[in-house]
Image: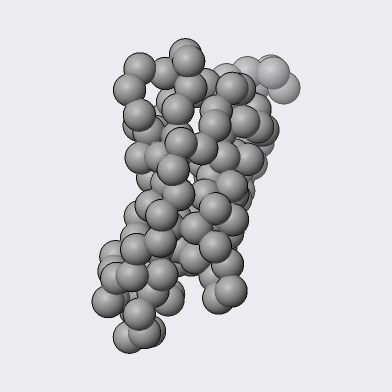
Amino acid sequence: MQLLRHPNSVESKHVRTAPLLFMVGVCLFLITATSSVCAGSCPLQAAASGKDTAIAMCAFSNPSFSGLCKESAPMKEDESADDACNGILQCLNDVRCQKTYCGGTTIRKGWKVDSAKESEGKNSILREK
């Protein structure tokens, strides 16, 4: 006797969706792997090159944030500490920015730069933001 299976049975759906789920998993893995490798410019490259790397030490404040937020930013050649800190400031004030600053705060309006100072560091290790 042969079993008749309904086209919408659980077994039938599993057979059709298994390859799809596998491909979705592969795509998510590739997206995650490439986004971590290609996420913006890599400040660690400059540090690993053996050259002195200029670092901007930035302090930000916001009335809705308790305390002072301190972050460091790699400085490009011929860039001031203010310019490097303004890149972080733009992200802090942009709801579309997905980088994390200030302990992962979700406050995305009302930030201002309190101070921006240049700090020279020999082979400094920078945190990727």
Nearest the viewer among 18 and 119 is: 119
Look at the picture and state if 103 lies above or below 118.
Answer: above
- Where is residue 83 drawn, in percent x and y? 59, 56
How is the structure coloured here? one colour
Nearest the viewer among 117 and 51 is: 117
Which residue is rendered at x = 54% and y = 45% of the image? 88
| Total count of labels | 0
- Quadrant of the drawing holding the N terminus: top right
User: Looking at the rendering, which quadrant does residue 90 occupy?
Assistant: top right
Which residue is rendered at x = 39% and y = 74% of the image? 53
Residue 4 visible in the picture:
no
Name, please, the residue furthest toward the bottom.
50
Name, please, the residue furthest toward the right.
7
- Where is residue 4 drawn, in percent x and y? 65, 21
For residue 48, side relative to residue 94 (left or right):
left
- Where is residue 96 drawn, in percent x and y? 67, 33
User: Looking at the rendering, which quadrant does residue 51 occupy?
Assistant: bottom left
Nearest the viewer among 22 and 25 is: 25
Residue 65 visible in the picture:
yes
- Where is residue 3 drawn, in percent x and y? 59, 22
Nearest the viewer among 1 and 64 is: 64
Which residue is rendered at x = 54% and y = 53% of the image? 82
Which residue is rendered at x = 35% and y = 80% of the image? 52
